[in-house]
Structures are given as structure tokens and as C-alpha cells.
Image: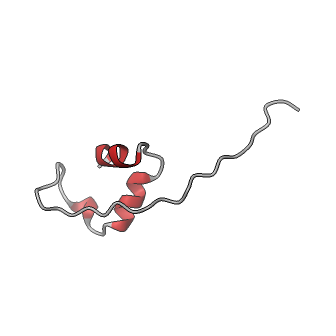
């Protein structure tokens, strides 16, 4: 699953969790997935960047 998510989204920050949430029962499927398994890859919310100050 992480290989699919990294290939599609380009990172793993919350992607596996989002895909599993969008695909009920997918976590119960043995990996590698059998042919014909449909996996919904949802749109993810845009990542927000926080400004941090290293020194006062």
C-alpha cells in the first residue's frame, strides 16, 4: 500500500491512512493485492506550511 501511495501522491504523510479510510475493507485484503481490486485514491487536503522562528 505504501508503494502505491508514494507513487501516486509523491509522499507518505497521511496518504496510507487516507486511502484506507476511503476504501472500507481494504486493510483486510492480503498484499500483494489480487488482480481486480479497486482502490480509490482520494484527493488530499492541501498541506499547510507553518512559519517557525529559530531565534528570538
42 sits to left or right of 37 = right
Viewer-closest of 2 and 6 = 6
Q: How many marks?
A: 0
Question: Residue 23, image x and y in percent?
Answer: 31, 66
Name of the residue lying farthest toward the right:
56
Indicate left or right for 49 with 43 as reference. Answer: right
In the picture shown, does residue 15 fall above or below 23? above
Q: Is residue 18 above or below residue 48?
A: below
Task: Return the x and y of residue 20 as percentages of the image width and height.
Answer: 35, 61
Residue reaching furthest to the bottom: 24
Rendered residue at 41%/43% (across/down): 10
Which colouring convention does the figure follow?
Answer: secondary structure
Q: Quadrant of the C terminus?
A: top right
Residue 29, located in which quarter of the rendered image? bottom left
Residue 6: give x, y in percent of width and height: 36, 44
The quarter holding residue 43 reads bottom left
Judge from the rendering whether residue 19 lies leftward or rightward of residue 44; answer left or right: left
User: Which residue appears farthest toward the left when viewing the image?
Assistant: 35
User: Which residue lies most toward the top here?
Assistant: 55
Identified at 38% across, 65% down, the residue is: 21
Residue plotted at (17% across, 48% down): 32
Q: Is residue 1 above or below residue 42?
A: above
Q: Residue 45 at what x, y percent from top left? A: 53, 60
Amino acid at each position: 500500500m505504501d508503494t502505491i501511495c508514494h507513487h501516486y501522491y509523491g509522499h507518505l504523510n497521511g496518504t496510507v491512512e487516507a486511502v484506507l479510510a476511503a476504501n472500507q475493507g481494504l486493510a483486510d485484503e492480503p498484499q500483494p493485492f489480487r488482480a481486480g481490486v479497486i482502490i480509490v485514491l482520494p484527493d488530499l487536503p492541501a498541506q499547510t506550511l507553518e512559519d517557525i522562528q529559530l531565534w528570538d
